[in-house]
Amino acid sequence: QVQLVESGGGLVQAGGSLRLSCAASGRTFSSYAMGWFRQAPGKERECVTIISKTGSRRYYADFAKGRFTVSRDNAKNAVYLQMNSLKPEDTAVYYCAADPYYREDDVTGARYDYWGQGTQVTVSS
């Protein structure tokens, strides 16, 4: 079992940056692909980015390409999301999630096994 705890959210002005972190418990962190998802009020949860177990593969949603970067440190049981050039439409609760399989087609995270509690990101205009 994996427990996930996100941190790093907050209030930032448009054009600013935030770095989200997700700390994982357990010895098998490297056995999981990790995803970042977000959900804005009244909207469906959507995938932001996915990183494979070793970090060799990454997937980004179109809105994240060129602005967001995902990374992981298996020695520290952590995954990160660097978000630059933030826009008001990036406002959402951001979640990290763990899945034994790297799936680029699971756009809502329905098949992910473990989830964090989420961290709020608010971008003001």
Image (cartoon, helix red, strand yellow):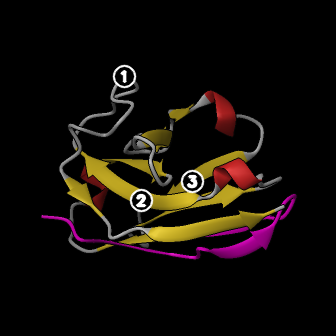
Name the residue at 25% across, 50% down: 31
Q: Nearer the viewer, residue 83 or 23?
A: 83
Compared across the picture, whether 20 is left or right of 99 comes to right
Picture quadrant of residue 27: bottom left
Q: Secondary structure at mark 2?
A: strand
Pinpoint residue 14: horizontal percent, then vertical percent.
84, 60
State which tag comes first along the sequence, 3 or 1. Answer: 3
Could you say where residue 88 lies in the image, as x and y percent from the top left? 74, 54
* Residue 30 rendering spot, x and y as whole percentages: 31, 54
Badge 2 or badge 3: first in the primary sequence: 3
Q: Residue under circle 3?
A: 71
Q: Earlier in the sequence, mark 1 or mark 2?
A: 2
Measure the C-alpha gap from mark 2 to mark 3.
15 Å
Q: Is residue 30 visible?
A: yes
Tell me the kind of residue under disc 1. Asp
Q: Residue furthest left?
A: 1
* Residue 118 falls in image quadrant: bottom left
Which residue: 57% across, 32% down?
61
Quarter that holds the C terminus = bottom right
- Position of 32 with respect to 43 (left or right) is left
Label 1: which secondary element:
loop
Residue at which label 2 appears: 95
- The residue closer to the viewer here, 58 or 61, is 61
The residue mark sitting in front, 2 or 3, is: 2
Position of 25 compared to 39: left or right? left
Q: Quadrant of the N terminus?
A: bottom left
Q: Which residues are magenta?
A: 1-20
Reading the image, the residue beneath label 1 is 105
Placement of 56 over or under 121, stated as above or below: above
